[in-house]
Amino acid sequence: MRLSMLRGLWLGLWAALALSAQAGGLFLWEASQAEQRIWLLGSIHLGKPEMYPLPAAIERAYAESSQIAVEADISDPAAATALLPLALLPAGQRLDAELDAEQRTQLSKVLAELGLPATALNAAKPWFAAMSLPTLWMQQRGWQPQYGIDLHFLQRAKRDGKPVRELESVLAQARLLDGLSAEEAQAMLSATLAPMARGEMDAQLDAMLQAWRQGDTAGLQAVLDASMPDGAVMQRVQNKLFNERNRGMAERIAALAAKRPLLVIVGAGHLVGPDNILRLLQARGFQVKQY
């Protein structure tokens, strides 16, 4: 698998999870405490040209901020090289050999829909296949990394000389996913394949974009709920991918907060739920409001 393709996949890694909940105007919040101010922007990591220009409030948040913070600097081409050993199966192993009959049928159907051979992802570990397939699907339908909110502001910040801080890193995220149990990784793959094989993915993507544009956080939460199967295994995955990471990111954000505003850009799924970043900042004494 070429590194350029791998980097493109990673740029969209969290796109299918970049969702939110609670009615409001934009996926933009302001958190303040004493003289500290933080802007928090819920991101869609792959986008379309019609998402631009961005609303004035988002542009103002960027203009006011002295630095930006992202989950990971996905503009760094070295990131793909670093994660490659974690994302691929050992030599001699194949993804299709690790799947049950239903998963193999679904994977073959989805790859055919994408115009790819049945062996296209045979080198990928199950978790990486689970994260790669939605990205490939989105890119085929016009969603591109260069229009994602993260990359848009990363590139602008570097042009404008604004410091870029990482709340995590690409490698840390890959290590987290690679640390999932075999059962958890298989559950992730099944949760990804099922709606794609049923032909539901396009409707979910359309609903996601419409809700994001309208600031309809409840609508985005509905997309998330519909795409997340019930069960103890997926609950563990959800906890690892969101709740545990939220605590670490909230701590890092609070440490970065200063008198000059900070713009934080994270997948919007990290801004909802019982242990979301906004609530964790509120527990630290920050006042939070949505724009």
Image (spheres, rainbow, N blue to C red):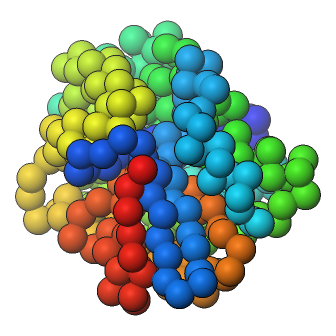
Residue 189: image location, x then y, percent: 31, 44
- Which residue ends up furthest to the front in the rendered image? 34
Residue 100 visible in the displayed image: no
Residue 66: image location, x then y, percent: 77, 66
Q: Quadrant of the N terminus?
A: top right
- Which residue ends up furthest to the left in the rendered image? 231
- The residue closer to the viewer here, 252 or 228, is 252
Q: Compared to 202, does 161 lie above or below?
A: below
Horizontal arrangement in the rendering, residue 210 relative to residue 29 (left or right): left
Q: Compared to 28, does 9 lie above or below?
A: above
Q: Residue at x 76, y 35 (%)?
A: 4
Residue 289 visible in the displayed image: yes
Horizontal arrangement in the rendering, residue 111 relative to residue 253 (left or right): left
- The residue closer to the viewer here, 205 or 114, is 205
Q: Compared to 207, does 230 lie above or below?
A: below
Horizontal arrangement in the rendering, residue 46 relative to residue 219 (left or right): right
Q: Residue at x 23, y 21 (%)?
A: 200
Q: Residue at x 65, y 48 (%)?
A: 60
Residue 160: image location, x then y, percent: 89, 51
Q: Compared to 17, does 1 lie above or below?
A: above
Numbered marks: total: 0
Q: Quadrant of residue 174?
A: bottom right
Residue 78: image location, x then y, percent: 81, 55
